[in-house]
Image (cartoon, rainbow, N blue to C red):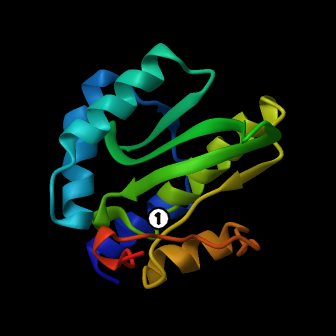
Amino acid sequence: MSSYDEKNQEIANSTVPVRKLNPGDIDAVVRIDKRITGSSRREFFTAKITESSKDSSMMVSLGAEHDNMLAGFLMGRVYYGEFGIADSVAILDTIGVDPLLGRTGVATALIEQFVTNMKGLGIESIRTQTNWNEWGLLRFLESAGFKPVPRVSLELKFDDIPVI
């Protein structure tokens, strides 16, 4: 076993500390996300973390640490329905783990803390969505207990609008 594998096995067998993200975490979140996606979404994450620090009753932002450094993050929100229909659900907006620390329990710790927080608010379920071909993420979400729901997501591209 390489020293990298031994180090990661050590993390997986320990408790991963999870805390609330703060504005000082933006650079680390952007760095992790860029390693995953290949592009910077600084404005998106700055807005999410800033909003979360101002209204923690609706927005949730969590960070997991390894060696006192941010190893992963999760952002979500509480959602109370639409169209006049009450629905006590949380939305998992984004989750990211430094690719160098994948399969070490970081994502699981983030999901577990998110679930704990949402249960404490009386939320009954968590919803999320991803691209259909994000196989690694889909496997992880399935292992965390997520299942497909009977909903259809529709899109209308303006180039596809029929002439009436």
Q: Outermost residue toward the front?
A: 164
List x then y, in percent, for residue 137: 48, 73
Q: Secondary structure at mark 1?
A: loop
Tell me: 132 left or right of 71: right
What quarter of the picture does the C terminus occupy? bottom left
Residue located at (56% from left, 73% from top)? 140
Q: Nearer the viewer, residue 97 or 125?
A: 125
How many tags in the picture?
1
User: Mark 1 — residue?
Assistant: 104
List x then y, in percent, for residue 80: 73, 35
Is 37 drawn above or below residue 67 in the view shown? Answer: below
What quarter of the picture does the N terminus occupy? bottom left
Q: Nearer the viewer, residue 86 or 135?
A: 86
Q: Nearer the viewer, residue 144 or 83?
A: 83
Tell me: 90 left or right of 63: right
Is 23 drawn above or below residue 72 in the view shown? Answer: above
Residue located at (70% from left, 68% from top)? 146
Dot 1, crowdedness within 10 Å: few (<14), some or many (≥20)?
many
Is 148 drawn above or below residue 25 in the view shown? Answer: below
